[in-house]
Image: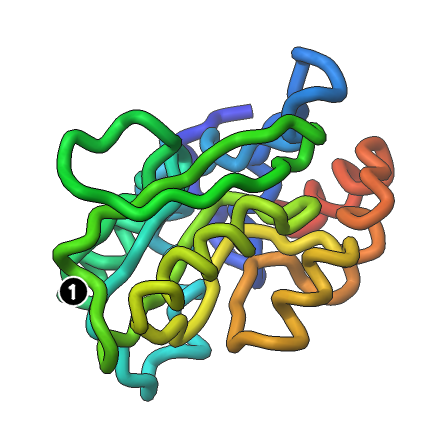
Amino acid sequence: MDLLAVPAEKKKGWYLSLMAPNTKGPMFSWLDPSRLYCNSQAFADCVEDLLSPFQKDSIDLVAGIDAMGFILGASVATSLGKGFLTIRKGGHLCVPSQHLNYTDYTGKENTLEVRQDVLKPGVRVLLVDQWIETGGTMKAAVQLIEGQGATVAGIATVAIENTEGGKWIKDNYRFSHCIPEELQSHIDGKDLNSLIQKLQKLSN
């Protein structure tokens, strides 16, 4: 596969075929979207698709979750012409910050933190991460933003699995993701072989 190539006919979500299966076992996300970021057109099309539902929305700031959400979120912010706020893993900020403990998709206890001098009532934030599995990390980020009085204007991510947490996000917030409806069941079931076959059709 030529990772930098662009198909002559770009089908909706064609760039998803560039995602790579993980090779490090079940404690890691089972698909790695970061490979598609290496292809400039794939990256641009991914960001465009994520922003499509929010084009007429009022957004003041984009926030991305440590660490892969920084890449996607900063690109979204640049595309919108908005500033970018980092939501960090615990212990990384050297300024006054608000902290929140949560359980991530591996079942491990973690902490997120955000600085206290940016968010305030009336600020509308588009929250970005790379992938939502159980939704624990995203829910913690939402609580940090809302805990300072700001509003979560929407949530954007490459994929949202229909777990309990993923459904909670879809039920309570405006959202966007890049997975076509016909592929959602393959994402939810982590059916890698079948998914790869489906994704290849998008790139051909």
From the viewer's perspective, is residue 35 above or below residue 146? above
Q: Amino acid at mark 1?
A: Lys
- Occupied quadrant, residue 183: bottom right
Front residue of this view, candidates 128 and 92? 92
Q: Residue at x 41, y 54 (%)?
A: 128
Q: Position of residue 33 (x, y in %)?
A: 52, 36
Q: Position of residue 2 (x, y in %)?
A: 48, 26
Q: How is the image coloured?
A: rainbow
Is residue 65 visible in the rendered image? The answer is: yes
Query: Badge 1: few (under 14), some or many (20 or more) residues near its Cα, within 10 Å?
Result: some
Element at label 1: loop
Q: Position of residue 192 (x, y in %)?
A: 80, 33
Q: Quadrant of the N terminus?
A: top right
Q: Which residue is mark 1?
A: 82
Q: Residue at x 29, y 75 (%)?
A: 124
Q: Residue at x 31, y 26 (%)?
A: 91
Q: Residue at x 45, y 78 (%)?
A: 53
Q: Position of residue 169 (x, y in %)?
A: 62, 66
**Relative to residue 119, is residue 32 drawn left or right?**
right
